[in-house]
Amino acid sequence: MTSMGSYRLPNMIVAVRVILAFVSAGLLASGTAATAVVGVGLVPFVLALDALDGAVARRLGVASRLGGVLDITADRIVEHVLWITFAVVHLVGLWVPLVVATRSLVVDAARGLALAHGRTAFGAETMARSRLTRFLTASRLMRDAYGVAKLAAFVLLGVQLAARRAGVDVVLVESAAHVAVLLAVSLCLLRGLPVLLDARAYLPDPARPH
């Protein structure tokens, strides 16, 4: 029998991930080069915890639909907190967090609709109805590519912020950060589109009598 403590451990990892994301955001926004360095140093650790909680849950045999929802929710919080922070310090345009947040809300609404029909975002009972959707949303290649793109964008932006506050000119880093941001946002939209297309199957049929 699985103990309650087994369920708590992956959930604690999720909570720590969210808390550290807010700590990182506070450090990045605090106004000094030193705190920006510490803040950006936390980012890889925060993103690495995303893989850890799921691995721990599977190892302990406590993976569940609720755990999957909590994991996705934590992903959203971390991602939005960091994009908003970099918009506040004027390293990305306001359009970036607005686009990412809108995509997240719409996609999660679609996933909620599928969940009501017993389908989850990932796993054996996935809502994906096509190979393309499974590849873009659930394949290790695409999940890793999106994770690496976000990590590169956040780290490069953090380095750019620290350098700017220290009075150091880092044109190459700024250019790389710009490319990484565009790539991350593009992958964000690309991975969300097939979810919306597949979610149409879970909408009520207006032709069906009530």
Image (spheres, grey):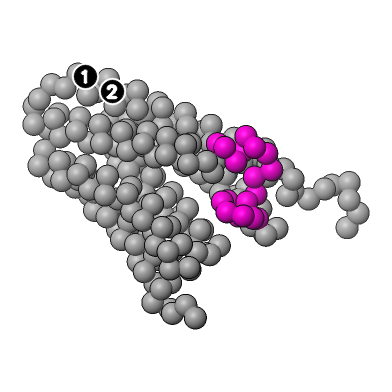
Report x, y in % for residue 77. 40, 51
In the image shown, does 22 or 140 lie closer to the viewer? Answer: 140
The part of the chain drawn in magenta is 119-136
- Residue position marked by numbered label 2 in the rendering: 176
Q: How many marks?
A: 2
In the image shown, does 35 or 10 lie closer to the viewer? Answer: 10
Report x, y in % for residue 10. 39, 65
Report x, y in % for residue 84. 34, 41
Residue at figure coordinates x 64%, y 37% from the top left: 131
Query: Does residue 165 appear left or right of residue 71 in this picture?
Result: left
Q: Amino acid at mark 1?
A: Leu
Residue at figure coordinates x 78%, y 50% from the top left: 204
Determine the image quadrant of residue 183: top left
Distance (Cα) linking label 2 and label 1: 6 Å
Residue 189 located within the stretch drawn in magenta: no
Q: Amino acid at mark 2?
A: Ala
Residue at figure coordinates x 43%, y 79% from the top left: 4
Query: Does residue 76 appear left or right of residue 176 in this picture?
Result: right
Query: Does residue 134 appear left or right of residue 210 in this picture?
Result: left
Q: Mark 2: few, some, or many residues within 10 Å (few <14, many ≥20)?
A: some
Q: Are marks 2 and 1 in contact (CB under 8 Å)?
A: yes
Report x, y in % for residue 49. 33, 53
- Residue position marked by numbered label 1 in the rendering: 172
Residue 90 shows in the view: no
Residue 111 shows in the view: yes
Q: Magenta residues: mostly which secondary structure?
A: loop
Relative height, residue 23 to residue 173 (above, below): below
What residue occupies the far right of the structure in this picture?
209
Secondary structure at badge 1 equals helix
Residue 132 located within the stretch drawn in magenta: yes
